Image (cartoon, rainbow, N blue to C red):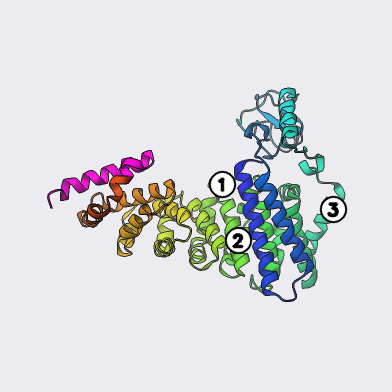
Amino acid sequence: MAESSRRLAADELKRELQIRVNCIVEDADYSIEDTDEAMHCLSALKDLKVRPAPPPEYLCPLSHQLMKDPVVLASGQTYDRLFIEKWLNNSSRTCPETKEVLPHSELIPNLLMRKLISLWCNDHGIELPDKEEQGIIPESDRYHFNSLLDTLSSNDDVLEKMKAAKLVRILTKRFPPLRAFFQEDSVAVTKLLHPLMSGNVNDHPKLQEDLITTVMNISLHDPNKKLIATNPVVIPLLVESLKFGTLETRSNSAAALCTLSSLESNKCIIMKAGALEPLVKLLDEGPLLAMKDAAATIVSLGVVKENRSIAVFEGAVKVIMKKITDRILVDELLVLLAMLSSYDKPIEQMVKLDAVSCLLSIIKEDTSDKSKEHCIAILHTLCYNDRTRLQEMSRDESVNGTIANLALNGTTRAKRKAKEIVEQIDKYFSGS
């Protein structure tokens, strides 16, 4: 799988492992299923760690999996036969990658690619997946899965709904092809979330947790992203669950919103639903994994400038400064802080929160090059045209030479920003 897909899979497994371990540690009457699931997650994480990542050209652009039967489309692009046939059957005659209209739909076997993939698999002791693993859902499984959704949408027995929700969550996690079921059935998402659509969203916390986690699972399937976000039920329920749910529910809701926000058209939908306020709150209150999900979602939404001002209004700068001062998620939160420092209001807040000394101290520490780069970029924004802040930096520089050192030894971007700050300090304070 592609590196981004491996990271998503690892985060999903870590999230599930954290839930199971919490159950085992905190509940004296934990179940055998909890221990089995925890062991499964650990085993899968180990496989991800030791299994080499295939060259990206060996992956189907549609499935992001190793191609078993690579074929060439009229556009010249190579895809796995199962997935491109499904694409051509369900859409207009266009190439998924280039978007060009195809003169014909004939598929030509890419024998060289097939041989190269086979050799790579042999060299690394990897077996190519069979057809079921690649994406064909047997009719019996399709019928069973649909019956579970019917239970969620029509059965009045809460216990039956809880059993069905738990199974759907497990199946969409363990058997990724089932995520495509929601793409094929336009009402499937509504049926899934039906139990949360009447009364308070968190009347039954475990049921809510399983359903929201399932939304997170199915949002990993790229064609579902638009389908989920444009369903008028889903985003409001995710935002409500971000506000009112267990920590696991809130974290998984943030993870689902993060995945959905990777599609540009979804960012404004998520913002208009009021997601930024509970995301900032989760960033402040949540455990580490939940904070990471919240930060990643705010960064993704922050690509739209309007969302940055809303995040600042909701108190993001104060929360970020508190976390990085305590050295929590420093790399991730500096990315967010750099993104927010693009206009006056957050800059004023950073200055009041002693950002200059905090950022200088991070640069002095043995932190990553990227963190130092983000720190100096923020300092450049804070201080370049502010003599008061420059004077504060000048005093530190005369003792520690932090910025001058970065101007010599940092990344290309860090060197440039550091050099400009040193020049400003020399211009105004060299004689003092």
Q: Sequence-wise, which precedes: disc 1 or disc 3?
A: 3
Q: Amino acid at mark 2?
A: Ser
Secondary structure mostly seen in the magenta stretch: helix
Q: Sequence-wise, which precedes: disc 2 or disc 3?
A: 3
Q: Amino acid at mark 1?
A: Leu
- Residue carrying label 3: 143
Please identify the residue farthest to the left as the structure is shown: 431
* Residue lying at 76% horizontally and 68% vertically, measured from the top left: 162
Q: Residues within 10 Å of mark 3 (few under 14, many from 20)?
A: few
The picture places residue 181, in percent across and down from the top left corner, at: 75, 49
Residue 253 is marked as: 2
Which type of secondary structure does the marked residue at label 2 adopt? helix
Q: Sequence-wise, which precedes: disc 1 or disc 2?
A: 2
Q: Nearer the viewer, mark 1 or mark 2?
A: 2
Q: Quadrant of the N terminus?
A: top right
Verify whether residue 225 appears in magenta.
no
- Residue carrying label 1: 263
Q: CA distance from mark 1 to mark 3?
A: 31 Å
Query: Is residue 312 visible to us here?
Result: yes
Q: CA distance from mark 1 to mark 2?
A: 16 Å
The picture places residue 152, in percent across and down from the top left corner, at: 76, 64
Which type of secondary structure does the marked residue at label 1 adopt? loop
Q: CA distance from mark 2 to mark 3?
A: 28 Å
Nearest the viewer among 259 and 372 is 372
Looking at the image, do the residues carrying marks 2 and 3 touch, with CB atoms under 8 Å apart? no
